Amino acid sequence: MDEELRSLAHRLREESGGGPACERLLTTGDREELAGVLTEPQQPLWARELAAFRLGCAGDRRAFESLVLLLNHRDPERCVSAAHALYLLADPRTPRAAAALATNELRVAYALTPIRLLTRLRAPESAPALATVLGRRLAPGDAHWRVALACVEGLGALGARETAPAVRAALPHPRLAAAASAALARLEG
């Protein structure tokens, strides 16, 4: 059992009450059984998350829609697990979905994990989405500075030189200045 699954299992055992249904979903090798959990009515969220995670990590694209929904969940731990499974799933739709979630202004409070996933994916959609989100977060009084910081760090990691103006615009912001300087060094160096 890898570390991500171990962490997920610990959290979901507590959430589910640790019954045999949870243990069954943790141990089954039957992908059809796992896929059934995603489509059967009245399945608890913990069961859907566990099934989607296991299918996604196994490369089964039937998990894609459920994982995207979990990537945008209000619970950060669910988002992180979904991002891990989406990365391993390697579905070509993932960058577009993550970019849509990251740039959705109505869900900006939940954009941190999609931004980090975009950085990890290094897809053509990644740098433009991060630059767009960063530009919006630089408005005076914006409360989502952690999202802006993730964008600055992500743009530096991506090395997309065309985003240097967006990163440079972050320099005057005290919480972003150090990360923006480091990112610019990578982008312009």
Image: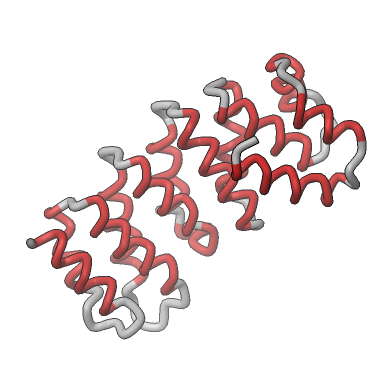
Q: In which quarter of the image is residue 43?
A: top right
Residue plotted at (57% across, 24% down): 58
Which one is nearer the viewer's eye here, 42 or 32? 32
Residue plotted at (24% across, 50% down): 158
Residue 132: image x %, image y %? 30, 57
Residue 6: image x %, image y %? 68, 43
Residue 115: image x %, image y %? 41, 53
Q: Quadrant of the C terminus?
A: bottom left
Which one is nearer the viewer's eye here, 24 or 150? 24
User: Height in image: 34 above or below 137?
Assistant: above
Q: Using residue 155 as the reference point, say whether residue 164 is left or right of it.
A: left
Residue pushed farthest left? Answer: 189
Q: In which quarter of the image is residue 50?
A: top right
Q: Using residue 13 as the reference point, say whether residue 75 is left or right of it.
A: left
Residue plotted at (61% across, 57% down): 76
Residue 164: image x %, image y %? 15, 62
Residue plotted at (54% across, 58% down): 110
Q: Using residue 133 as the reference point, say whether residue 49 is left or right of it.
A: right
